[in-house]
């Protein structure tokens, strides 16, 4: 099953966030609760943990990009051979 990693809303006034660092690479195994990426919100860097076990299959938002809350940042799958959206 394909799961989405989305830009979280970490404050009431947050509208956008910037991906500063991906801590995992495409194809790497993830465990729920482990650090996945860092985002910048209002000049503060926040570490975002994986919500899922599985594999980081496709990163859609590159480091340095700013996107609105709710934007899909990446896809996670249970196995490496599952199809992901294009």
Image (cartoon, grey):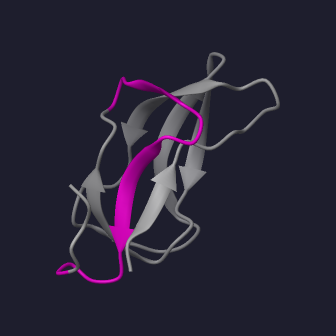
Residue 71 magenta? yes
Residue 54 magenta? no
Q: Residue furthest front?
A: 86
Q: Quadrant of the N terminus?
A: bottom left
Q: Residue furthest top?
A: 43
At a point 57% along the width and 66% down the height, the residue shown is: 51
Residue 53, horizontal then vertical, whole percent: 46, 78
Q: Classify residue 42 as left or right of residue 52.
A: right
Q: Pick whichever, 20 or 9, lies toward us.
A: 9
At a point 62% along the width and 44% down the height, the residue shown is: 8
Give the extent of the magenta segment: 63-81
Q: Quadrant of the C terminus?
A: bottom left
Quarter residue 25 falls in: bottom left
Q: Is residue 65 above or below residue 60?
A: above
Residue 52, horizontal then vertical, whole percent: 51, 72
Residue 83, horizontal then vertical, whole percent: 21, 74
Number of numbered discs on residues = 0
At a point 71% along the width and 26% down the height, the residue shown is: 14
Q: Residue furthest left?
A: 81
Q: Classify residue 55 as left or right of residue 32.
A: left
At a point 78% along the width and 33% down the height, the residue shown is: 11
């Amino acid at each position: 099953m394909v799961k989405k990693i989305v830009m979280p809303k970490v404050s009431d006034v947050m509208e956008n966030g910037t991906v500063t660092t991906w801590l995992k690479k495409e194809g790497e195994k993830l465990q729920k609760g482990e650090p996945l990426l860092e985002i910048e919100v209002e000049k503060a860097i926040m570490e975002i943990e994986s919500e899922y076990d599985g594999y980081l299959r496709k990163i859609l938002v590159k480091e340095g990009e700013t996107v609105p809350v709710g934007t899909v940042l990446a896809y996670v799958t249970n196995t490496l051979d599952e199809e992901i959206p294009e």
